[in-house]
């Protein structure tokens, strides 16, 4: 599927798509071949460094980039086993295939999508 098919509520081209509900997260993972998920918190300094990297990356890849606020959606983070933030996970075919903990460069994330 194309990167603009995150879900009917959250769809956009480019940029980080803020997860609005557990359901929208599940839909985006199920409806897209690949998804990049940024687990973050507003108070996290390294997360603030990760955000512009992911915003730039989102315009150059054929996969949506979802932002999961771990304070708001701690259940999603716990289900994914996220223990440190920022954590960037790459999902393919509905399953997590790669995980990066800490600030991660666009090239590393892009390589995980290839």
Image (tube, rainbow, N blue to C red):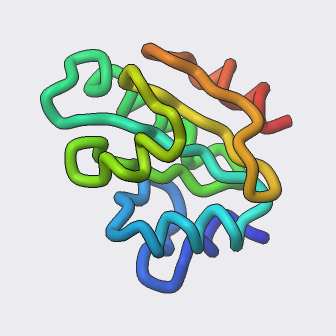
Q: Quadrant of residue 5?
A: bottom right
Choose between 58 and 45: the one closer to the eye.
45
Quadrant where the C terminus is found in the figure: top right
Q: Is residue 55 visible?
A: no
Give the quarter of the figure containing the N terminus.
bottom right
Task: Answer whether residue 109 is visible to the viewer in this image.
Answer: yes
Q: Tell me what residue is drawn at x 21 percent, y 18 percent.
A: 45
Q: Is residue 3 above or below residue 92?
A: below
Q: Where is 69 relative to 20, above or below?
A: above
Nearest to the observer: residue 88 or residue 13: 88
Relative horizontal placement of residue 21, taking residue 103 as reference (left or right) = left
| Residue lying farthest to the right in this orientation | 114
Q: Is residue 79 left or right of residue 92?
A: left
Across and down, in percent, residue 22 comes to 42, 67
Q: Nearer the viewer, residue 71 or 14?
A: 71
Image coords of residue 25 (percent x, y): 49, 64
Residue 94 percent across, percent down from the top left: 74, 58
Which residue is rendered at x = 41% and y = 42% of the image? 77
Q: In the rendering, at what x and y percent does residue 37 appear?
A: 53, 44
Q: Residue at x 56, y 67 (%)?
A: 26
Is residue 6 left or right of 9 when viewed as pictured?
Answer: right
Asked where in the image residue 2 lies, by quadrant, the reply is: bottom right
**Which residue does the image show at 43% across and 73% down from the upper left?**
10
Q: Residue furthest bottom?
A: 8
- Above or below 53: residue 12: below
């Amino acid at each position: 599927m194309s990167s603009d098919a995150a879900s009917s509520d959250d769809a956009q081209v480019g940029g980080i798509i803020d997860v609005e509900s557990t359901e929208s997260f599940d839909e985006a993972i199920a409806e897209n071949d690949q998804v990049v998920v940024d687990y973050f918190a507003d108070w996290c300094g390294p997360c603030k460094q990760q955000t512009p990297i992911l915003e730039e990356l989102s315009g150059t890849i054929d996969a949506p980039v979802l932002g999961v606020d771990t304070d708001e959606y701690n259940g999603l983070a716990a289900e994914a086993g996220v223990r440190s933030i920022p954590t960037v996970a790459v999902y393919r075919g509905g399953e997590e295939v790669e995980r990066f903990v800490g600030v991660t460069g666009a090239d590393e994330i892009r390589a995980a999508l290839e």
